[in-house]
Amino acid sequence: MLRWPGRAAAATLADVTAVDRDPHPSTATVGYRSATDLAADLDTGATTSVDVVQTLLDRIAAIDGEDGVDLRAVIATSPDALEQAERLDAERAAGTVRSPLHGVPVLVKDNIEAIGLPATAGSLALQGRTVERDAPLVTRMRDAGLVVLGATNLSEWANLRSSRSTSGWSGVRGLTGNPWALDRSAGGSSSGSGAALAAGYAPLAIGTETDGSIVCPASLGGVVGIKPTVGRVSAQHVVPISASQDSPGPMARTVRDAALLLDVLTGTPDHAPAVGDLEVGAVRVGAVPAWLTGHRPTDARFAEVLESLRSAGAAVVDVVLDDAPGVDDDELTVLLCEFVDDLGSYLAGRPGEGVRSMADVVAFNRDHPEELAHFDQDFLEMALASGGRASDGYAPARARCLHWAVDQVLAPALAQGVDLLVGPTYGPAWKSDLALGDHPGAGGAITSPAAIAGWPVLCVPMGLVDGLPVGLTLTGRPGSEPRMLAVGQVLEMLLDLGDDHRPTWAAPARG
C-alpha cells in the first residue's frame, strides 16, 4: 500500500487578501475574467473586443513596468492589438464568428514568431531582427479570431544557456517576478506566460515545453498548462531546442479555456467537448510514490486531493515501479546534440540580418558582457562541442532515454489498470537568485518521463501551501489529451478553488 507523508492543511483563500492587494483594481475584473466568460460577454454584447483589449493593455502598462510592480512578464505588446480587435468586432457585428474564442486575447511566448512581435527567445542576439512571418500556431489563432495581444518574457533560450541560470531571466527583459510573491520564481522557461496569466494580463497564453517548461510555471503561478503530445501542435517557426521533445501548448486559468485553445492549435474539435462529460466515478488514475516532491506540506496536500477523489467515487490506484536509475546525463546529451543542430537550422532559415548559427550566438554573447552579467553560457558551448546528432554518443543516449521513459516507467505504470498517472508538480515557488542561479524547490519528477517520450502532461492548480500555489500533474499515452482534460476538469470542480484564486502580490513571501 502506498504510504503518504503526514497530512498538513493547505492555506485557504480566507488567509489571503488577493482582491484588496491587486496593484490595478480598476482593470482586475476584466483581467481575471475567463476566456469562456469573456466569449459569452462578447456574444451577448455586454462588451467588445476593443474594450477588453484596451483594458488589458492598460493593466499591462500599469503593472509590468518600473512605474508599477515591475513584474516583467511581457516583452512587448502587439502594435496592432486594437486594430485586430476592431476588425473582429466588425466581423461579429456582421454575423461572422470564427470560433468560440472569437475576439478573445492571447499572449505568446517570445520564442514564437508572430508578425509585429520580436521573437527574441529572450536573447539580445535576436533583438531587433524583424519578424516577417507567423508561426503556423499563430496563424491558427488568427484564423480562429483570437487577438494576439503581445509576447511574454521567458528564461533565455528556453533555459538551455547555462547550468546555473535563473529561471525567468532574459537579456532582453530581465527577471520575471511571481505575482504571488514577487521575490519568488515564476518558473521556467515559460515564466512570462504563467506570470502574465496569474497577473490577469490575459485569459490565455502560449508556452513551450522541452521538459517541464509549461507545467512548472503553471504550478508556481496557480494556473493551468498543458504540453500536448510532441508533434500535435506545430513547432515550425518556434525557436527550438529539441525536435524530439519540444512542444508548444496552451496555458489558461481554467481547464475548459485550455481545452478550447488546444482545439484551435491542433485544428481538431476533440478537447473542449470532452471537458464536463466525465463522471467522477469513471476516473481511474495511478499515483506514483516516486513522484512525490519530498516537500511534506505539498505532498500532504496531494494526499488530501487523492482522498477527495476516492471519497467522490474515483478509483485511485497505488502504482509501484521498479527502481530504475534516471537518465539525466543522457537526456542532457540528447538535448545538447539536438539543440546545436536544430537552432543552427532555425537561425540559418530565419529571415533578417543577424546570428546564423550557435557559434554566432556564443560569439555575440562574448562580445556583449551584459548577456553574461549573471551567469555564463556553458550549455551553449557544450552543445557547440557536442557534434550534434552525428556524434557517436547521441543515438545510444537517445535509445537509453526512450528505454527508461517508456519501457521502464510509463508503460509499466499505465499497465497497472489506470488511464492516467498523477503526481504533485512542484513544491511552492523558491526564491529567485541571480547571484547563485536556480536552486529549485522539491518536485518535477513527473515531467521527465513524458518529456523524453514526447507524451502529454497537464498541470492543474491544487491549492495553496504556505500561501503559494502548488499544482498537480497528469500524464498519459500519446493522444490522451481529451481524457486528460476531462479528468482535469473533474479535479478543478472537486477542488473548487473559485474565481478568487488570485495572487496576493506579497513581497517577500513567508518561508
Image (cartoon, rainbow, N blue to C red):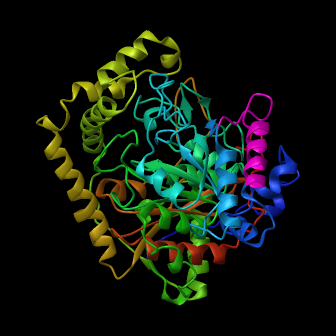
Q: Quadrant of the N terminus?
A: bottom left
| Relative height, residue 153 to residue 295 (above, below) | above
Residue 57 in magenta stretch: yes
- In this view, the residue in front, 95 or 429, is 95
Which is more toward the observer, 366 or 13?
A: 366
Please state, as top left, top right, bottom left or bottom right, where the C terminus lies in the image: top right
Q: Residue furthest front?
A: 94
Residue 31: quadrant of the picture = bottom right
Whole-percent x and y of residue 309? 57, 80
Badge count: 0
Q: Is residue 256 above or below residue 205?
A: below
**Where does residue 170 sit, x and y in percent of width and height?**
54, 29
Q: Residue 326 placed where, x, y %?
A: 30, 51
Seen from the viewer's position, the closer of residues 407 and 130 is 130
Residue 6 in sight in this render: no
418 lies above or below 479 = below
Relative to 420, 471 lies left or right: right
31 left or right of 485 in image: right
The residue at 59%/57% (across/down) is 146
Q: Which residues are magenta?
A: 50-74
Q: Is 183 situated left or right of 245 in this image?
A: right
